[in-house]
DNA sequence: TAGATTGTTAATCGATTAACAATC
DNA sequence: TAGATTGTTAATCGATTAACAATC
């Protein structure tokens, strides 16, 4: 098995998709599947599937294919779902509330332990098993509970001010919904950006150019 | 200028980022910028920036660089913001409501004209200038107003049932928040997926493997 | 004019696909 | 054993970077 750091981002970003489709097969009661069959379901080439999986080890068997239960479990381990990250959410506006409510943190290796906001009208409300807390208490909270991941659902300017503070407090990973580019200044941080408006702009281009 | 269809997806997906950074420069009052300066701000190489922009035409001037106002406006045109797409939102749960409230549709070439749900408790509520309407009225509405884009904020199974119906009714573009893979069955549709849980799983992997 | 910076071609790099020997 | 399908190497394809002549 190659060292994980050698695995390219292209491959890593396909892992969740494998996990989703295998989960589906699992629920359907499918026992084994070949890279060929999986390629039809997922819209990848069989070659790519075998290549991708072999970055992490040999999970298949010649002449048989892949055992669905075993492969699903293996990918869950690779993604690191059994190593829980203590997580905080910053910003409990519309988007933050939707994220907190909608997301299955527990099943994905995260444990939401705190929600913060600066709006007095929101502070004190209950959200996904957490009391929305004044952002002023962020330092105290982190020193006590040592979260490693932060979900950033605040406007750009607020994110700009928060990022350094969060890195300082030991946050290693960011699920970033703001337009502030955390990675540019904090190179060591792991940042997954969800730029909704970028996605919408791309859709605009494509609707105008791909449908003729 | 090459035909748009020749422009690769990699380039298209960077356009919104250019637009965002140029908008920022615009607000800061910066008049001109070189690909070198922009590369430092954005974290792309200067070479890539020039290469990308030249897919759409020569917007710069040797020895000068790029005029910020002009380039910003040009990218807005390329993205197609001046050609408004009539848009409907399906699913007014937590996520749908956040999307409807949070998103600047008007500034991005979209016009939200209808919101649909099947939950009687939600139908009739007011959301982003629309009355939440019973999904049963989808056909009548589309035949009258001819929307071209649908935002899908419903669970996987509902999306699976809806997709064909929407394509049938003339929807060309999908902003898809569900885990149903619309493209697999409807090849002609333009689909932008926002797979939040995939993004979170990727973060899980990276936090576990990139921070040692 | 001299300096700067683009537009564009060529070189490099990485990712995907094809092919096939190994093996269940 | 024969058939199927993997793991893996080699070939192809596409995207990024480097270089530089054109030109403002």
Image (spheres, coloured by chain):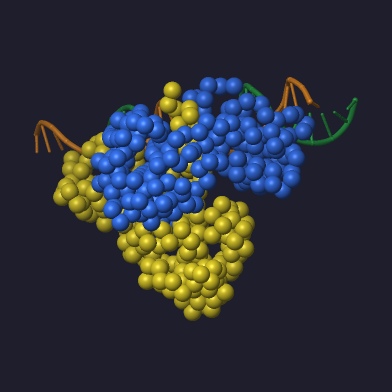
Chain colours: A yellow, B blue, C green, D orange
Looking at the image, residue A197 lies above or below residue B3: below
Q: Residue at x 69, y 43 (%)?
A: B26
Viewer-nearest residue: D3 or A138: A138
Q: Residue at x 63, y 25 (%)?
A: B57
- Left or right placement of residue A66 versus residue B80 in this view: left
Is residue A135 visible from the viewing direction of this image? yes
Where is residue B87? Give x, y as percent. Answer: 43, 38
Viewer-nearest residue: C18 or A76: A76
Looking at the image, residue A17 lies above or below residue C8: below
Where is residue B161? Give x, y as percent. Answer: 25, 41
- Left or right placement of residue B169 versus residue B32 in this view: left
- Left or right placement of residue A43 versus residue D24 in this view: left
Q: Residue at x 53, y 78 (%)?
A: A140
Looking at the image, residue D7 lies above or below residue C3: below
Label tally = 0
Where is residue B177? Give x, y as percent. Answer: 38, 47
Is residue B184 visible from the viewing direction of this image? no
Quadrant of the drawing holding the C terminus of chain A: top left
Viewer-nearest residue: B88 or A6: B88
Q: Residue at x 41, y 56 (%)?
A: B200
Where is residue C21? Give x, y as percent. Answer: 27, 34
């Amino acid at each position: 098995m190659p060292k994980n750091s050698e695995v390219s981002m292209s491959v890593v970003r396909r892992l969740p998709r494998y996990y989703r489709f295998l989960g589906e097969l699992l629920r359907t009661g499918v026992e084994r599947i070949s890279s060929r069959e999986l390629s039809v379901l997922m819209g990848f080439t069989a070659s790519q599937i075998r290549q991708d999986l072999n970055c992490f080890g040999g999970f298949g068997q010649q002449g048989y294919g892949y055992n669905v239960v075993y492969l699903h479990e293996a990918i869950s381990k690779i993604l690191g779902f059994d190593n829980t990250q203590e997580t905080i959410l910053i910003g409990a506006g519309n988007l933050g509330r939707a994220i907190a409510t909608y997301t299955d943190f527990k099943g994905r290796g995260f444990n939401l332990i705190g929600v913060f906001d600066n709006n007095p009208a929101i502070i004190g409300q209950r959200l996904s098993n957490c009391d929305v807390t004044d952002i002023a208490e962020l330092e105290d909270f982190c020193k006590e509970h040592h979260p490693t991941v932060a979900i950033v659902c605040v406007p750009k300017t607020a994110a700009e001010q928060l990022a350094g503070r969060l890195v300082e407090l030991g946050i290693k990973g960011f699920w970033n919904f703001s337009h502030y580019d955390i990675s540019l200044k904090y190179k060591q941080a792991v940042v997954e950006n969800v730029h909704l408006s970028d996605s919408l702009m791309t859709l605009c281009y494509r609707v105008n150019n791909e449908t003729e």
